[in-house]
Image (tube, rainbow, N blue to C red):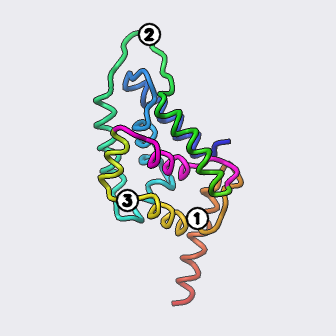
Amino acid sequence: KLTEKAQEAVIAAQELAQNNQNSQIEPEHLMYALLTQGEGVVPQIFSTLGANPEMLAQQFKGEIDRLPKVYGSTAQVGVSPRLARVLDNAMQQADNLHDEFVSTEHLLLALMEVGGGETDRILRGTGIHRDQVLRALTQIRGNQRVTSQNPETTYQALQKYGRDLTEQAS
């Protein structure tokens, strides 16, 4: 029950792990994929909170480059135990927010909660906490629930509608 953007992020993380010759997809791969996702909610959240998503992405890319590599044509990329915990937690995050699908913001909240390792270190280094992410998310998505596989179009329409109303008022 992943949204289209969440599916794209997981696939991008897998491709990144394969291209980097890593044997497992780690939370760092997923976080990098979320930060570099075009028109994604995660870069908007970090920008709203005053963090630079591009600089964060580069930190994650540096960590990915340090992960162990596996060579040979038989190397298969699997989900690491840490990432499996993140994916399980993302489902819980969606349930907690009464959403029907797991979206990129649920993945971010799960990464912040159970990402561990370098993901935890880098995210803590931003000084951004879960409550701040939830407030920024409310600004971006309003009170909309994730009830479809493409909720980002609804968020973008809400933001445009809000800008249009502000412009009309002035």
> Image height check: is 15 above or below 156?
above
Which residue position is annotated with label 3? 128
| Disc 2 from disc 1: Cα separation | 43 Å
Which residue position is annotated with label 2? 73
Q: Give the residue drawn at x 54%, y 76%.
A: 163
Task: Residue 101 in the image: state x and y as whole percent.
Answer: 67, 48
Structural crowding at the residue carrying mark 3, measured as other residues with C-alpha within 10 Å and reported as few (<14), some (14–19) or many (≥20): some
Q: Give the residue drawn at x 51%, y 62%.
A: 134
Structural crowding at the residue carrying mark 2, measured as other residues with C-alpha within 10 Å and reported as few (<14), some (14–19) or many (≥20): few
- Dividing the picture into quadrants, the one containing residue 161 is bottom right
Query: Which stretch did the figure color magenta?
Result: 99-117
Task: Residue 69 in the image: state x and y as whole percent.
Answer: 34, 20
> Image height check: is 65 above or below 116?
above
Which residue position is annotated with label 1? 141
Q: Give the residue drawn at x 62%, y 44%.
A: 91
Q: Secondary structure at mark 1?
A: helix
| Disc 3 from disc 1: Cα separation | 19 Å
Q: Secondary structure at mark 3?
A: loop
